[in-house]
Structure formats: C-alpha cells, structure tokens
Image (cartoon, helix red, strand yellow):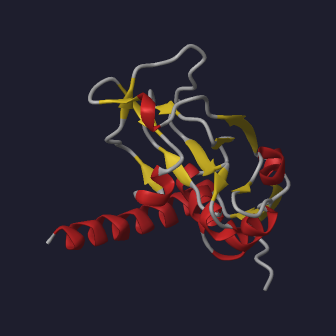
Amino acid sequence: MKISNWEHRKLATIATFAKGRGYSKNDLTDRGTPLILYGRLYTNYSSAIETVDTYAKPLIGSVYSKGGEVIVPASGETAEDIARASAVISKGFLLGGDLNIINPNSEIDPVFLALQLSNGYLKKELASKAQGKSVVHIHNSDLENLQIIYPSLVEQMKVSTCIRMFDHLITLHQRK
C-alpha cells in the first residue's frame, strides 16, 4: 500500500549522527549529572526518556543531550535486542559510550522516529544490519542508510502523543 502524502527519505538526509562517550557502571555515583548508559535501553526501555536514575561525574569530552536526540544501542547480545531506540527529551544528560546518537532535523519528531525504529519493518531492517556472533554491533553508517517513511510533523506528533499516553497508562497500572 502506497501512502502518497508520506515522505520517503534515507535517514542520512533528515538527520545527523554522533556517538556517546566513555562511562561504564563503574562511573556511576549517587549524585551528579544524569547519565544514560546503553543498558538502560534494555532494562528500563521507553520510547521517550525524560528522567533517569543514574548519575556520574562528567568526564573530559563528555557528550550531553540537547533534547530531541534519538539513541540506539551500538552493541547487544542479539540482533533483536539491538533493534530499539529511545528519544531523549531532556537536555543536559550525559550520553554514555556504546550509544549511536541520531539528531533528526526539524521535520522529524524524535519520539515518532524512535517508535519507528523500534517497531515494524524498520525494527526488522535494523536487526538485519547487526553484525557479530556473541556480541552484535550496529554502527551509525548502518543507520544512515535506513529508508524512513513519515507523515507531516503534526501527524507525527499526534501519533507520538497517543503512544506516550498509552505508555503512561501502562506504567500507572504496573505500579498498582
């Protein structure tokens, strides 16, 4: 089925790419600057990250979120594990090593992009690009070539808002 009013673009044409820096579990402290480690995408996954409960003392050359990035793990145990993404909503978070960072342009809602990369055909495509046996890896160069299909920014934001509301409801019910 062709969706004529949706754009079809290579991810590299609508985003720039970077890598996280340093940091491991050994760098964690009780207080400090909020830190996202790649393992969070496995243990506490959400399509949008607004708060974290891990902290570290900033290192020289640290990468900080500006808000609006999409992060994808650079390594994992299986291809399916690695095929996930989260939008970083808040600014000022340290972005740890082993994270691929996607900075979408103003046409793309970060949560919508994270949802796309974590579900459906793009999840399968992302998993197929993972390389390795006991530990699999994915690189920004693999992400750059993904074909993204997206509606207007207004429609993207409606989808993102709806999914985030459901995520919030699920979280509330799990706390009961």
Q: What residue lies at 60% left-to-right and 65% top-to-bottom? A: 81
- Side of 77 where 6 appears, left or right: right
Of 160 and 83, which appears nearest the observer? 83
Residue 63 place in picture, x, y as percent: 57, 26
Q: Quadrant of residue 32?
A: top left
Viewed as shown, does residue 83 lie left or right of 130? left
- Of 80 and 140, nearer the camera is 80
Question: Residue 61 placed where, x, y %?
Answer: 60, 17
**Residue visible at 49% across and 61% down?**
160
Task: Specify whether residue 45 is in view.
Answer: no
**Residue that extends furthest to the front in the rendered view of this protein:** 134
Q: Which quadrant: the C terminus?
A: bottom left
Quarter of the image where one finds residue 93: top left
147 in relation to 17, above or below: below
Give percent across and percent down for residue 148: 76, 61
Q: Residue at x 76, y 64 (%)?
A: 133
Is residue 95 placed above or below 131 in the rendered structure?
above
Q: Position of residue 107 (x, y in %)?
A: 67, 47
